[in-house]
Amino acid sequence: MPFKPASAAKTVFYNLLIFFVIANVLYWAIPVGGAISRLYKTSLVETWFRTIRPSYSDIDPGWVRQHWMELNQGETVYRSHIGWRHAPSAGKTITVEGPFLQRRTVNAGILGDRKAYFFGGSTLWGIGSDDAGTIPSQFAARTGIHSENFAEHGWVAHQSLIFLIQLLEAGHRPDLVVFYDGANDALQKCRPEIGPEAHERERQFDTVLRNSLRPDSFSHFFAPMVALAQRVNERLGWIGGTEWSECHRNPQKAAAIAENLLRDWRLAKQLIEGYGGKFVGILQPVAYFSRTRVDYLALSADDQAQYAAVYPLIRAKIAHGGEFHDLTSVLDVEEAIYLDWCHLPPKGNRYVVEKIAEIVAPLGLGR
């Protein structure tokens, strides 16, 4: 039977057409992005849970599984200028509520009118802890100062600064503001596609916007496959030890990231002090700089190189200026504290809270 190019081309065309129709039905009929995100997070949770971390040795395993499942089910919503916030949820270990979509802080028994607002990333938000075990909740119990948790997963200091401005514009007047940063600023901004002033999802938002604004674009029809391919490529890169960051070979960028963090803190400090409050900027501890047990952790050599490039610069600036605080050694204890490179269980948060309480004591805000 002779080969007919026209017939073959027609067959290929119709097969591609069917493929595109099926792909787009799936794309528009179900939340593919959310499904991919849940698949990714589920694999991450199960990886962590297969062997309960030694740092959870004093906590009921059932509680641990419940917490990580609730964390896995959490969704985020887009918010102008700050990027994203967790959607409202009410679980047994995690509650997100209120007009500002914040993690619940337990303020039981606090009678004073002093208020402390906390800002930071997922460690401060409380990955690994129930509502009562987060840093803001434990700080409230320790000091008697009513506390609020305005942290969010993946946030860098600049997002917290913008959110603080929004709160001040809404009439909030906290007596104390604590910024607990460093882990995300160093790790996320060291990626080559992100600049020192960006947040971790800049490229993701840009890709989605360009595709959604150009539905006639050929690449638009590949959106679900592209998203999945990016996730698979990312995971394979981690497994293969691929370098995803550049600060260890780009000292100019490392210096810019360090300076950008300090500038955000200085602006936040000026704002709060202008309204009569107090500001505390804290460089958070990470496993790469803590003298504690890390033998059970699968730490990334690439991530370690980024922290080694950025953290010493931040620490030097803090030591020279004297206006902010370096807590990188606060977890130097002979026990398993970390859940990964930065997240902590409630007992780890207690060490942090004790140090913050010590820093705040001279400010005359507590009981």
Image (spheres, rainbow, N blue to C red):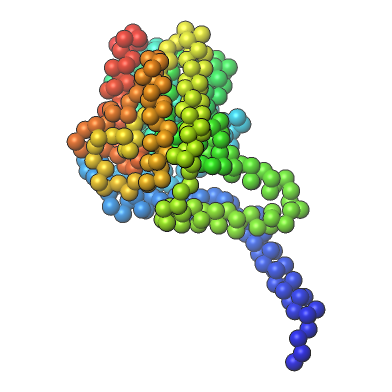
**Point 55% across, 57% down: residue:** 229
Q: Position of residue 362 (x, y in %)?
A: 31, 9
Residue 314, picture quadrant: top left
Q: Position of residue 294 (x, y in %)?
A: 26, 43
**Point 34% across, 43% down: residue:** 340
Residue sitting nearer the eye, 284 or 35: 284
Q: Position of residue 270 (x, y in %)?
A: 50, 12
Residue sitting nearer the eye, 245 or 222: 245
Residue 268 in sight: no
Residue 353, picture quadrant: top left
Residue 340 in sight: yes
Residue sitting nearer the eye, 42 or 130: 42
- Tell me if residue 89 comes above or below residue 232 in the rendering: above
- Tell me if residue 267 comes above or below residue 234 in the rendering: above
- Which quadrant, please, contains the N terminus? bottom right
Residue sitting nearer the eye, 316 or 82: 316
- Tell me if residue 90 comes above or below residue 366 in the rendering: below
- Which quadrant, please, contains the C terminus? top left
**Point 40% across, 11% down: residue:** 113
Q: Position of residue 313 (x, y in %)?
A: 41, 27
**Point 37% across, 25% down: residue:** 315
Q: Is residue 275 left or right of residue 351?
A: right
Total residue callouts: 0
Q: Is residue 207 left or right of residue 334?
A: right
